[in-house]
Amino acid sequence: MIQRLAIALALFSATGAQADPRGLEIKGFRIGMSEAEFKKANPGAKCAFSARDPAWDKTIKDRRTCRLPGLTLATKKAQDSQFLFFEDRLGSWNASFYEFYGKELQEALAEKFGAPLIEPRLPGVSWSSGSTLMQLVFTGSSALLVVQSDISTDWGVKLQEFKLRKGKADL
């Protein structure tokens, strides 16, 4: 469920409120950090390959996913979290919370990053800094925090280009 909603969110482009120029770093989760830096700061993280197909050529690097059991934000425990590494750089991450934590999470994020914009296409709010977008979306049963960047978008574009090349070669 989280992964499907995160993918759907990635398809939407949105402009959020301009956040602190230091970026949208939360609890040391910094877009662009290496998996080794992430694991050093979060020794309880469980990481594995999440996207790799033997048919891919060398232009498509592996994607790895780390989960962080027990993650809390603003003292609220996440139900689940995933951190996606593309070519060994954190490109996106998300965490799901019970819906009733949503307003408190939004208030804590607004205190740190400034007032958000209301997200017109989704029930939630957003912030942006540079090429990083953070959205807090209310699904009706969960509050989903999604942070994404051009790192994840670029990897997805490379994958689509490869699939197109492979498809044309099979004609």
Image (tube, rainbow, N blue to C red):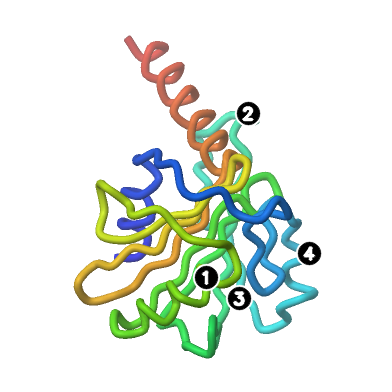
Q: Choose the circle earlier in sequence order: 1 or 3.
A: 3
The answer to whether residue 9 is above or below residue 98 is above
Q: Are marks 3 and 2 in contact (CB under 8 Å)?
A: no
SS of the residue at dot 3? strand
Which of the pair 57/88 is nearer the observer?
88
Q: CA distance from mark 2 to mark 1?
A: 37 Å
If you read the primary sequence from the N terminus, does the residue marked by circle 3 or circle 2 appear first? 3
* Callout in the foreground (1, 3): 1
Closer to the N terminus: mark 4 or mark 3? 4
Residue 153 lies, in percent from the top left, at 52, 38
Please state which of the two labelled residues, at mark 4 or mark 2, is closer to the viewer.
4
Report the quarter where the C terminus lies. top left
Q: Amino acid at mark 3?
A: Lys
Whole-angstrom CA distance, mark 3 to mark 2, is 26 Å
Cα–Cα span, label 1 and label 3: 26 Å
Residue on which the image places disc 2: 59
The answer to which image quadrant residue 111 occupies is bottom right
Specify the quadrant of the image occupied by residue 69.
Answer: bottom right
| N-terminal-most mark, 4 or 1 | 4
Residue holding disc 3 = 46
Tag 4: amino acid: Ala
Residue placed under numbered mark 4 in the picture: 36
